[in-house]
Image: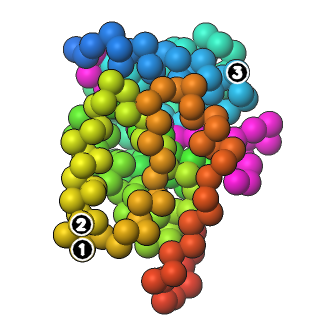
Amino acid sequence: MQDKENSSGLSVVVYCASSAHIQDVYIDAARKLGKVLAENNITCITGAGKQGLMGVLNDSVLENNGKVKGIIPQFMIDSGWCHPQLTELVITESMHERKFLMAKQSDAAIALPGGFGTLEELAEILTWKQLGLYKNPIIILNVNGYYDLLLAMFDKMIGEKFLHHNYRKMWQVVDSPDEVIDCLQNFEAWEPSFTKYDKKEL
């Protein structure tokens, strides 16, 4: 993985919930992930929210002297959703631009538990990796077995031939934030053999 704008280390985008009405086990995981990223000099890229797991994650990175780059559309700022103390804030015109920049500026993607938005972001980055547009690690943080049913659905897609079995190599699954660093340091390079045309990476 090559360094992006942060010359001192990697940048990782984290997809996660903005809901504040969730169990402590998920909050604890977000807090721990923030600490792990900060301690390993990894810039955390998020959607810049101040609530839910995103807010906890942002707070944890900053409290541990780490860096957070928030990327958020203007309408969310107007709605009062933006975290007030991020290291860097990037304002976009649309959700599409937001997601594109989050992926483009990252050396890896991590999915904490979340709702529709997190699921959509995870599905999109997996699709981009399937097409060879994103070749960096994608880590699913399966806290408390949250993603068990989704992972079973992935297996069903493969079993029913909607996905090639080699696509299992596109993602890594861990149960705790402590395992994330090992995944970042040890991952299998993704070179989809089915790709017939050269594509520009993000």
- Asked if residue 14 lies in the magenta stretch, the reply is yes
Frontmost residue, 53 versus 161: 161
Location of residue 117 in the rendering, given as x and y in whole percent from the top left corner: 27, 41
Mark 1 belongs to which amino acid?
Lys
Q: How many numbered markers are drawn?
A: 3
Check the image and report above or below for 111 versus 19.
Answer: below
Q: Residue at x 41, y 56 (%)?
A: 125
Mark 2 belongs to which amino acid?
Gly
The residue tagged 3 is: 39
Q: Quadrant of the C terminus?
A: bottom right
Q: Residue at x 43, y 69 (%)?
A: 166
For label 3, the crowd category at 10 Å Cα-Cα, with few meaning under 14, some 14 to 19 and many 20 or more, is few
Q: Residue at x 41, y 65 (%)?
A: 167
Location of residue 65 in the rendering, given as x and y in whole percent from the top left corner: 69, 15
For label 2, the crowd category at 10 Å Cα-Cα, with few meaning under 14, some 14 to 19 and many 20 or more, is few
Which is more foreground, mark 3 or mark 1? 1
Location of residue 28 in the rendering, given as x and y in whole percent from the top left corner: 43, 13
The residue tagged 2 is: 159
Q: Is residue 141 left or right of residue 150?
A: right
Location of residue 87 in the rendering, given as x and y in whole percent from the top left corner: 62, 25
Q: Quadrant of residue 1?
A: bottom right
Q: Quadrant of residue 173?
A: top left
Give the spatial CA distance, label 2 vs label 1: 5 Å
Badge number at residue 161: 1
- Asked if residue 48 lies in the magenta stretch, the reply is no
Q: Main secondary structure of the magenta part?
A: loop
Mark 3 belongs to which amino acid?
Glu
Q: What is the magenta range?
A: 1-20
For label 1, the crowd category at 10 Å Cα-Cα, with few meaning under 14, some 14 to 19 and many 20 or more, is few
Frontmost residue, 166 versus 23: 166
Q: Earlier in the sequence, mark 3 or mark 1?
A: 3
Which is more foreground, mark 3 or mark 2? 2
